[in-house]
Amino acid sequence: MQQELARWQERLVADGFVLLRAFCARDFVARVAAIARHRADEVLAALGDREIGIGSAAGYAELVQRSPGRWDVPVTPAEFGIDDHELPWWPLVAAVLGSDAEHSFSGVVFSDPGSPAQCWHIDSPHLAGEHLPPHALNVLVALHDIPLEMGPTECARGSHRLTNHLRNSSLVRNELIYQTERTSPALLVAATDEPLPPRSVEPMAAGSCLVFDDRLLHRGLANRSAQTRHVAYFSYRRNGYGENTHFESARSLFDG
């Protein structure tokens, strides 16, 4: 286990992400999937025929449309009936962020059939001009097999270093975090001598986990299948880190 943990850490440092194939037990995946889908159904029923915009500020506390046809519903560890410290990826989170790392967010993201690819984006800004270890880690868990036509997550390998807007004046912080068509891997190397970051995307078997640095440029690809794609997510932050652009709306679907 220690050798594997060291290898995963190396991949996170070098690439900004690591894919842990078929990592979770089947019964765990089935339980998380059932709870996630039940909660998503509740939230969508509460939404009813109300329209919702794109992005966290335009959504609700219980629902965000991240991009057209791609829905994000928060589910707490308590609602999942799990303890973060007992999850199979916790040793990696603790090794990278510290044993006092804190839970940030968890829930399910589902993309409708026909939903287009997201724009490239990161989840958190850099805090200093020099490269620092990650502020946070995100864990995406495939709740069923996700072939390429269903739109797994694409990563720009090594881009967690290149997205530093404090070092590269051609980058705009909010254009990296909030999805815009202007952002692309090529943008990262403007005004620098850096090579273009290579892209990496793989199908994910049920129970596989994609763990990535919060500053990594990534995007969910288009769902070209006839089935809805469901992915659970668990996000963790270094103790004391307070940046939050994930759920920004204070309004609730359940307000009278």
Image (tube, grey):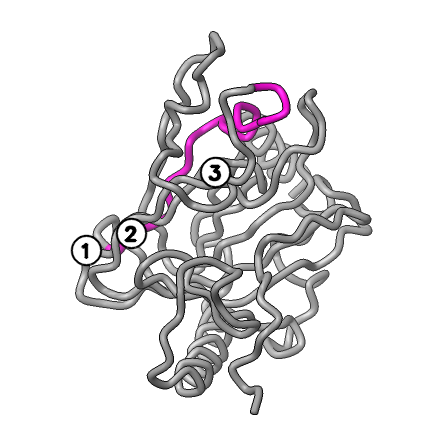
User: Within the magenta stretch, is there residue 159?
Assistant: yes
Q: Mark 1 packing: few (<14 Cα in 10 Å), some, or many (20+)?
A: some
Please tell me which residue is depicted at 38% across the width and 60% down the height of the picture: 206
Mark sitting on residue 201: none
Task: Give the quadrant of the C terminus.
Answer: bottom right
The residues tagged by marks 1 and 3 sit, at their Cα atoms, a distance apart of 27 Å
Q: Nearer the viewer, residue 172 or 72?
A: 172
Which x, y percent locates residue 24? 51, 60
The residues tagged by marks 1 and 2 sit, at their Cα atoms, a distance apart of 7 Å
Mark 2, secondary structure of its residue: loop
Q: In this image, 142 relative to 239: left or right? A: left
Which x, y percent locates residue 8? 58, 36
Please tell me which residue is depicted at 36% across the width and 61% down the height of the picture: 70
Q: Residue beneath label 2, please?
A: 151
Using the image, determine if residue 253 lies above or below residue 69.
Answer: below
Q: Are marks 1 and 2 in contact (CB under 8 Å)?
A: yes
Task: Give the quadrant of the N terminus.
Answer: top right
Q: Earlier in the sequence, mark 2 or mark 3?
A: 2
Q: Mark 3 packing: few (<14 Cα in 10 Å), some, or many (20+)?
A: some
Quarter-wise, where is residue 121 in the image?
top left
The residues tagged by marks 2 and 3 sit, at their Cα atoms, a distance apart of 23 Å
Amino acid type, callout 1: Arg
Q: In this image, 168 relative to 109: left or right? A: right
Point out the frontmost of discs 2 and 3: 3
Q: Nearer the viewer, residue 103 or 90?
A: 103
Mark 1, secondary structure of its residue: loop
Q: Residue beneath label 1, please?
A: 224
Q: Residue beneath label 3, please?
A: 175
Q: Mark 2 packing: few (<14 Cα in 10 Å), some, or many (20+)?
A: many
Amino acid type, callout 2: Gly
Magenta residues? 150-168
